[in-house]
Amino acid sequence: MVASQETLDKLEDIGLNMYERKIYSALLGRGVSTAGELSEMTNVPRSRAYDVLESLAEKGFSVIKSSKPMKYVSVPPQQAIENIKKQHRQELQEKIDRLDDFKDSEAADELESLYDQGLELVDPADMSGSLKGSRQIQQHRGTMFQDADDSVKILTSEEGLGDVKENHLEELQEASENGADVKVLAPVTEDNSHHAQELQDVAEVKHLDEDEDVDAPEGEFSIVDDDAVTMSMTHSDVHSTQDSTFWSSSDHLAENTMSPVFNTLWNQSEKPEGPEGIDQP
C-alpha cells in the first residue's frame, strides 16, 4: 500500500525524492520488508531500490536489518521527522561555523581590502539602484543595519513597524551593541504598540502623530551612518515578489537630504504613551 498523492507531495516538501517517498510509504504499510518486495509494490526499479533504502536509512526514515535477504524496518513518522530535523540543525550549524571561521580569516580580510580598493574607483552614481522582492530588500537592509557604527534612522508606517521588529530586531540589536544610535519613527497605535515595546530594548521609538500638517507614511525609508539610504517604492499591498526599494550609498543624499527630513519629523514627535501607545519609563 502506498500513501495518497497528497501525502506523497507533503513528503517532497521535507526533502524526500520521488522514489524515497514511494518506498517509505510502502515500507510503513508493511513494517518490515525486502528491497525486492518494495520494488514490486512501488514500481521502483529493483536496482534503484537498494540505493533508495540506504538513503532513507541515512536520513533516519528506516533501519537496515542484518539478515539474508537484507530487510528494512520502517521508522515511525514522528520519530523520522525528529531525525531529519536533527540532521538539518546539525548541517546548518556546521555551515554557520564554516561561515564564522571564514569571516574571521585572512581570506576575508583580503576580500575586504579588494572591495575597499574597488570602491575608490566607483562613480557615486553607480552606488545606487533598485532592489526587487521582499527577501532581497530585507537582506540588504539587514546588512546595512549590522554594519552601522554611528546611527540608524528608520521612518516607517503603522504596519511597517511590525515588519521592522519581525525582520530586523537582531540586526538593530547588533547595531546598538556596536554603539550606533538607533531611532525608529512610526505611527504607534493600539494595534502595533507591542512591536514598539519590543523595539524599545534596542532603539528609541517615537510616535509619528498624523495631523493637518503631517500625513502618516504609507512607505518607509532608512538612513544608516548618514551615508546609506533605502526608500520603499511600492504600496504595502503588492505581492512580496513585486516589492521594490531604492537604495543608495550617497553620503550627500543620506546626510544632506534624507537626514534633515527625518530629524525634523523626529523633533516634532513624542514618545508614545497612553491607551493607544506604549508607556515609557
Image: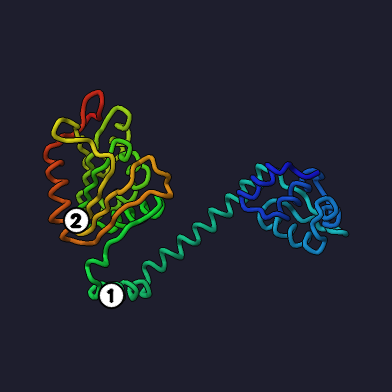
Name the residue rendered at 33%, 76% in the picture: 110
Residue 274: x %, y % from top left: 22, 25
Name the residue rendered at 65%, 42% in the picture: 78
| Residue 281 appears in the figure | no
Left or right: 65 in relation to 248: right
Q: Which residue is more in the foreground, 152 or 103? A: 152
> What is the quadrant of residue 105 in the picture?
bottom left
Element type at marker 1? helix
> What is the quadrant of residue 196 in the picture?
top left
According to the picture, the residue beneath numbered tag 1 turns out to be: 118
* Three-letter code for the amino acid on which mark 2 is drawn: Asp
Left or right: 56 in relation to 123: right
Left or right: 5 in relation to 181: right
Q: Earlier in the sequence, mark 1 or mark 2?
A: 1
Name the residue rendered at 27%, 29% in the picture: 189
Q: Which residue is more in the foreground, 202 or 222? A: 222
* Crowdedness near tag 2: few (<14), some (14–19) or many (≥20) residues, C-alpha within 10 Å: some
Q: Which residue is more in the foreground, 158 or 53? A: 158
* Crowdedness near tag 1: few (<14), some (14–19) or many (≥20) residues, C-alpha within 10 Å: few
* Three-letter code for the amino acid on which mark 1 is drawn: Gly
Q: Is residue 17 above or below residue 157?
A: below
Query: Looking at the rendered structure, which numbered label has been put on residue 150?
Result: 2
Element type at marker 2? loop
The mark closer to the camera, 1 or 2, is 1
Q: Which residue is more in the foreground, 117 or 246? A: 246
